[in-house]
Amino acid sequence: HRHVLDLASFSVADFATVLELAQRFRALPVAGARRLPALQGRLMTSLFFEPSTRTRTSFELAAKRLSAEVQSFSPSSSSLSKGESLLDTARTYVAMGADILVVRHRCTGVPHSLARDLDRCGERVSVLNAGDGLHSHPSQGLLDLFTLARQFSPEAPTPESLRGRRIVIVGDVLHSRVARSNLWALTACGADVVLCGPPTLLPDCFADFVLAPPPGQAADPVAVRGRVQVERRLEQALPGADAVMTLRLQKERMQQHLLTSLDTYHRQYGLSHRRLALCGDGVPVLHPGPVNRGVEIAGELLDDSDRCLVEEQVRNGIPIRMALLYLLAAT
Ligand code: CP
């Protein structure tokens, strides 16, 4: 791959490669970390047109741990405000030596069209999608896959660690690029995914989630895809779960009428220790963050690090992004 734009184009072998590398990077000491020289002389530029805490910082830390130079871009103080196009802005950074552009944008497809236009211009630069609109957030999907695989197989997390597992994804699936990336990754690795939420946030069509390869690509010969199922009630979704992932209510992308009230949502779909009694002891809870505390997850559960893997997901974001940067720029 020259670019990482979504997980639909990842084969099982691609997932295995990323997980194996991330496991190796994760084993390296963090405090006072010695930098690996793999990306010495490379430059990563982050172009974020939407706010971020986790993704931006962990990409930057990952790049630094591989000895890359890191450059950040702030849209409001850039020459975009003078009318320069996004493509010309990107080419300006490439002219300054950028090898990798990490791009987040509120509009679906921006990293894809930027990658295509840069390829057409003959620029030798990789585009890494850090989240586009409702569509895709591949590095988050990979770090969630890694976190889950490590739960089931701590010493050797592989795609096979997910095969036959029942993963419940709860909440605002409609607005969630994380849910879409997780659907691709988890089902490609053979996990069954149960989506749970009200019809306003989880339309019925998600039950028909298309698991065919993208146009022009052959089916992955190794993949035996997991199934996707829609449940409206948590009480029906949770029994038998191997892990539960809940999603942020994306109020900034929502029409007013999609929610009755946050209290009602929490009563029906909020996770708590009491609710989790419906699945087995020790079934882990994930959330991509940022969390609306007390809405998607009760505060007490969020603070229970034995049960809730939110901090573990954040920690795993660094080795996963190191693996992506390494694969794009070191080889
Ligand atoms: N999960 C995630 O993408 O978080 P940020 O928006 O903080 O990067």
Image (cartoon, rainbow, N blue to C red):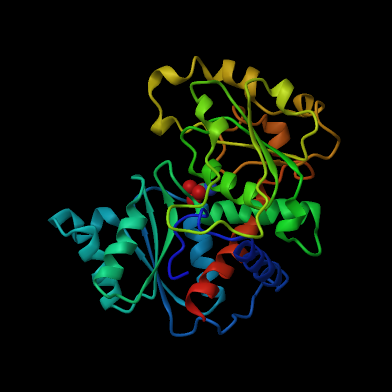
Q: Say if 262 sits above or below 298 in the image.
A: above
Q: Nearer the viewer, residue 133 or 116?
A: 116
Q: Nearer the viewer, residue 137 or 298?
A: 137
Can residue 153 be seen here? The reply is: yes
Name the image quarter holding residue 74. Answer: bottom left
Residue 290: x and y in percent read: 54, 42
Name the image quarter holding residue 209. Answer: top right
Q: Residue furthest left?
A: 82
Residue located at (50% from left, 29% from top): 205
Residue located at (76% from left, 44% from top): 165
Residue located at (58% from left, 17% from top): 263
Can residue 48 be seen here? The reply is: no
Q: Residue furthest right?
A: 281
Residue located at (52% from left, 21% from top): 199
Q: How many marks?
A: 0
Lateral position of residue 188 relative to residue 45, left or right: right
Residue 96: x and y in percent read: 28, 78
Lateral position of residue 158 relative to residue 292, left or right: right
Name the image quarter holding residue 113. Answer: bottom left
Q: Nearer the viewer, residue 52 or 86?
A: 86
Residue 195: x and y in percent read: 62, 32
Q: Say if 205 sits above or below 127 in the image.
A: above
Q: Say if 65 sits above or below 183 in the image.
A: below
Q: Nearer the viewer, residue 242 or 8?
A: 8
Lateral position of residue 1 relative to residue 145, left or right: left
Residue 265: x and y in percent read: 58, 20
